Amino acid sequence: MKTPEELGLNTLFLDLNSYFASVEQNEHPELRGRPVAVVPMMTDGTCAIAASYEAKAYGVKTGTKIYEAKQMCPNLICVLARHDIYTHYHLKVLEATNKHIPVTKKWSIDEFHCDLMGREKQPENAKRLAQNIKNQIYKDVGPVIKCSIGIAPNSFLAKVATDLQKPDGLVLLAPEDLPGRLLDLTLRDLPGINVRMEERLNKAKIFTLEDLWNTSPKQARSIWGSVGGEKFWYWLHGYDIPHIETNTCMVGHSRVLDPELRVPEKARLMTRRLLFKATMRLRRKGFHAGTISLGVRMVDGRKWEGAARFPAAQDFFTFMGHLDDLWTSMTLEFFGKTPDQMPARITMKKVSVILHSLEADGTITDDLFNTEIAETRKMMTKRESLSNAIAEINKKFHNEAVSLGIVPKTLAGHVGTKIAFSRIPDIEEFSE
């Protein structure tokens, strides 16, 4: 573990400002300088998933209900989210940044980490590098795409530095300056401290950033109730504690249904479409799955969840068969009817499909005691061959050249594929 003095200015962190909204303003000049909210669907009952700085000036932010946002800002312009465009811009920003320094880690669609080396660690050189990146993004990506860049001993502090000056900021937090400007922040300004964590800190008599700074690693571990608190203390103080890389443990999609898709049959078709896309991702990542889960949330708030286990597979037809069984179990349990008996009335609000119990290609072993293994292998080979053919046709011709059943049309266009937290969609997902 390196001290902040040993690290020096070790990390450059780039945070794109009001990213989704800025992309829309860059794509549509008539939106520039106007309050914009990006929404998942065009209804006042939904929430803003991004807001331009002009909208933020009225108090509109991510998570604000649109009917409330329009009361705050009567001139608010709502724009339907286009996750494919945001992913394309993400790749363009990466390319522009890599012209000056390699991007070491992509934390999210709009946050990048870069390691500084050698003379890049010198303050003036680090500032010059950051400004060159900003200029390159302006030139290659667009004049409205702004970013705040933080430079600090570690990734945590560099990210915090980006929040000290927005939009279009550039802030250095050198080891000798700590805690310095950090003391101007509130506890909730720090990544990882939410309302509940703030309450726990308050119970421990910690109310300000200065209070938190003056704790000890052991005290932080006690407050967090885990080693995570101790790691947080070291990150805050500028030490280098590596982040643990996580492995893929599931592949899935969920969707809040458009109003016209909330009748049972259309909702069922949506689950099949989500599963089809999840299967394409699974295959592209080189995994087999041994469990499928279905989740359904009703309009009245009730929820149903179920799962099925089976020998690890990666073909559409095995998964579809188990999904149909789960859907039947759901309708029988909640409504006492089979799917074909369900009335065409609005009952369902959200559906999700997840494939888990993942095994990498080449690690699958047959059941030693399965007497029907030869017949099973023969059937699986046929299903796999057909799945391969479907995947190849769609890869060549794009846009659902072959699909299993009717593909439900949505307002947003792309089914299942969306940017969520740290998940950045593969560009191929938008043509599957």
Image: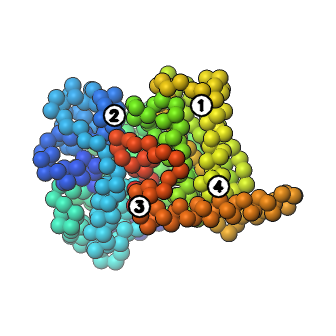
Label 3: element kind: loop
Label 1: element kind: helix
Label 1 vs label 3, nearer the camera: 1
Front residue of 126 and 201: 126
Disc 1 to disc 3, C-alpha distance: 32 Å
In the rendered image, which residue does mark 3 sit on?
Answer: 398
* Circle nearer the N terminus (1, 2): 2
Which residue is at a point 53% across and 24% down the rendered structure image? 343
Q: Is residue 238 left or right of residue 22?
A: right
Residue 219: image location, x then y, percent? 53, 43
Q: Give the residue type that dot 1 points to.
A: Asp
Q: Are marks 2 and 3 in contact (CB under 8 Å)?
A: no
Q: Give the residue type that dot 4 points to.
A: Ala
* Circle nearer the N terminus (1, 3): 1
Which picture quadrant has residue 378?
Answer: bottom right
In the rendered image, which residue does mark 4 sit on?
Answer: 289
Which residue is at a point 50% across and 22% down the rendered structure image? 300
Q: Give the residue type that dot 2 points to.
A: Cys
Query: What colour scheme was applied to this rendering of the protein?
Result: rainbow
Q: Quadrant of the C terminus?
A: bottom left
Label 4: element kind: strand
Against 155, is 362 above or below?
below
* Circle nearer the N terminus (2, 3): 2
Against 398, is 58 above or below?
above
Which residue is at a point 31% across and 39% down the rendered structure image? 39
In the rendered image, which residue does mark 2 sit on?
Answer: 47
* Circle nearer the N terminus (1, 4): 4
In the rendered image, which residue does mark 1 sit on?
Answer: 340
